[in-house]
Amino acid sequence: QVQLVESGGGLVQAGGSLRLSCAASGRTFSRYAMAWFRQAPGKERDMVAAISSAGRTYYADSVKGRFTISRDNAKNTLYLQMNVLKPEDTAVYYCATKGDGGTYDYWGQGTQVTVSS
């Protein structure tokens, strides 16, 4: 059974940085795409960054140039380095990975990121 556990969220001032981690278990980590999503109160859940099994990356326009997604296959861990944080980045951040059907079927519990002005 695939399990994902996020960590690293917290409270930070605007302009600051945080690094989120997502520890994965239950299958061959390196073979599947992974992504970070976020959801703020009153808003829909949106993808902010993704990384393929080959290491190709995708970023939403709102975070491009500020966030970096990476994966350490030896540690079965996904990361999201977040720099120059803005109050509008405040949200619960979730990591996710694709199932064999090609959709994001597995999700972590989420970690809260709060950016103050």
Image (tube, grey):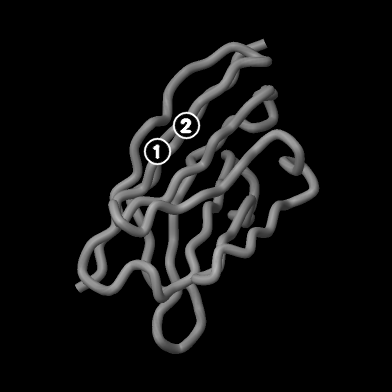
The numbered disc on residue 65 is none
Residue at 80% from the left image edge and 48% from the top image edge = 61
Q: Secondary structure at mark 1?
A: strand
- Residue at image mark 2: 19
65 to the left or right of 36? right
Residue at 45% from the left image edge and 50% from the top image edge = 94
Q: Position of residue 16 (x, y in %)?
A: 60, 16
Can you tell which quarter of the image residue 50 is in? bottom right
Residue at 21% from the left image edge and 69% from the top image edge = 26
Quadrant holding the N terminus? bottom left
The numbered disc on residue 111 is 1
Q: Secondary structure at mark 2?
A: strand
Q: Position of residue 14 (x, y in %)?
A: 66, 15
Extreme residue toward the bottom, this view:
101
Q: CA distance from mark 1 to mark 2?
A: 11 Å
Q: Is residue 89 above or below residue 99?
A: above
Residue at 38% from the left image edge and 61% from the top image edge = 107
Q: Position of residue 47 (x, y in %)?
A: 62, 56
